[in-house]
Image (cartoon, grey):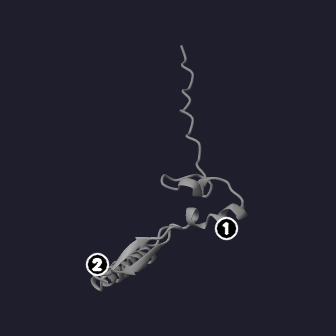
Amino acid sequence: MSEAPQKSPPAPPKQATASSAAPGDGIRSMRSTNVFRAINFELYAKPNAIVMGIGLVAIGITFGYIAYMRSKYEGLGYYSAIQEDGKEVFVKRKSKWE
């Protein structure tokens, strides 16, 4: 008896490198319009550690300056008071004798 020639298993489908989504691509791999990409630029840009570091330093300096100014005014005898309209103001402490 003759045996039929064996067929090789089917080859796996080829993956297109440009259009296939790689792990970690997230929303970049989805189809979208240019307007959506322009409005939501942060979703498509790769993280930049240098710019992030500069931003963290700037926010840290800003919070430090606010804390410094607040402690400076409190050291001079001012305190924060809330006005009737809900606005916060610094008022000089008055002696009970005045």
Q: Secondary structure at mark 2?
A: loop
Please give the name of the residue rendered at 68% of the width and 56% of the height, measured from the top-left corner. 32
Inspect the image, locate mark 2, and give the three-letter code of the amino acid beneath it: Lys
Label at residue 86: none
Can residue 29 be seen here? yes
Residue beneath disc 1: 38
Determine the image quadrant of residue 57: bottom left
Mark 2 residue crowding within 10 angstroms, few (<14) / some (14–19) / many (20+): few
**What percent of the width, then of the height, locates residue 82?**
44, 69
**What percent of the width, then of the height, locates residue 67?**
34, 78
Determine the image quadrant of residue 76: bottom left
**What percent of the width, then of the height, locates residue 70?**
35, 79
Mark 1 residue crowding within 10 angstroms, few (<14) / some (14–19) / many (20+): few
Please give the name of the residue rendered at 58% of the width and 58% of the height, measured from the top-left corner. 28
The one nearer the camera, 4 or 93, is 93
Q: Is residue 5 left or right of residue 53?
A: right
Circles 2 and 1, Cβ within 8 Å, touching? The answer is: no
Sequence order check, earlier mark of 2 and 1? 1
Inspect the image, locate mark 1, and give the three-letter code of the amino acid beneath it: Ala
Please give the name of the residue rendered at 52% of the width and 53% of the height, measured from the top-left corner. 22
Residue beneath disc 2: 96
**What percent of the width, then of the height, locates residue 16?**
61, 52
